[in-house]
Image (cartoon, helix red, strand yellow):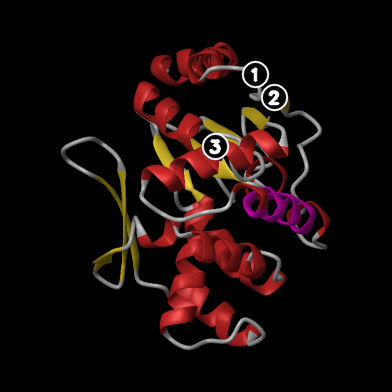
Amino acid sequence: MTNKAIPIVTIDGPSGSGKGTMSMMLARKLGFHYLDSGALYRLLALAASRHKVALDNIEGLAVLAGHMDITFAMKADNGAPQIILEGEDVSTQIRAEEIGLLASKVAAIPEVRAALLQRQHAFAAKPGLIADGRDMGTVVFPSAQVKIFLTAGADERAKRRYKQLIEKGENVNLPALIDSVRERDERDSQRAVSPLVPAPDAHQIDSTDLSIEEVLQLILDLVQPINVEAAAG
């Protein structure tokens, strides 16, 4: 269980909604810790690929999930998250499209989610935590003081991802990416365990027609009361 005295803000939402960007910006602004829960599933997908653990080997995946040698740090030059797997910086590798698709599949396995739950709880520490994912407000941190569900239209989210990949020099097809986003949405929202749905008490924000700055300000307005309490504490 997590300490209720520690301020926790959860930002859930589908792929491409901007929740990762918002979470990092918010964590830096408030000086809170940051949990990218999606990175854990991407790390598991990468580790499974490297260790030749098949995706239908549920027991093997659960064991790997509980024993992965991983470290999260912040880069000294720009403050960006640095993700280390078995001593190697894999921050870029886990963002590959194929790893994201594998991560979505392993994330649907109940035994895997259970194995990673305690690891996620361990990120809750003073002065506070910003937790980014798909079930942060519903399953992992249901007592979080502020819950955000950030979304955007599927086409818009695919276009954002397309732009990111093109800027990285990757060869991608926009129509295929739109189909991939929609398929992932369906898989994430319909899985039996921890489906992608807003928590009943979540503040829902549609970022389709909003700038990054506008979304950040909306979230800051919601978070300000608990930030004041954290500072006072």
In the rendered image, residue 159, in percent from the top left (x then y), is placed at 58, 38
**Element type where label 2 sits in the image:** strand
- Please indicate, yes or no, whether residue 215 appears anywhere in the rendered image: yes
Q: Nearer the viewer, mark 1 or mark 2?
A: 1
How many numbered discs? Answer: 3
- Distance between the alpha carbons at the discs numbered 1 and 2: 8 Å
Whole-angstrom CA distance, mark 2 to mark 3, is: 14 Å
Do callouts 1 and 2 mark residues in contact (Cβ within 8 Å)? yes
Per the picture, the main secondary structure of the magenta-coloured stretch is: helix
Specify the quadrant that holds the C terminus.
top left
Mark nearer the N terminus (2 vs 3): 3
Left or right? Give the position of 92 relative to 108.
left
Q: Residue at x 71, y 39 (%)?
A: 154
Instruction: Tell me the number on the disc at residue 160.
Output: 3
In this picture, which residue range is highlighted in magenta?
Answer: 176-187
Q: Amino acid at mark 3?
A: Arg
**Location of residue 94 in the rendering, given as x and y in whole percent from the top left corner:** 42, 61
Amino acid type, label 1: Asp
Mark 3 and mark 1: Cα distance apart in space: 12 Å
Task: Provide the secondary structure element on which disc 1 rests.
Answer: loop
Q: Disc number at residue 79?
A: none
Residue with the mark numbered 1: 209
- Which residue does the numbered mark 2 point to in the structure image? 206
At x 65% / y 29%, what residue is drawn?
148
Instruction: Decide which of tag 3 and tag 1 comes sooner along the chain.
Output: 3
Image side of residue 19 versus residue 126, left or right = right
Frontmost residue, 188 versus 136: 188
Q: Does 102 appear above or below 30? A: below
**Residue 89 percent location from the top left of the image:** 26, 61
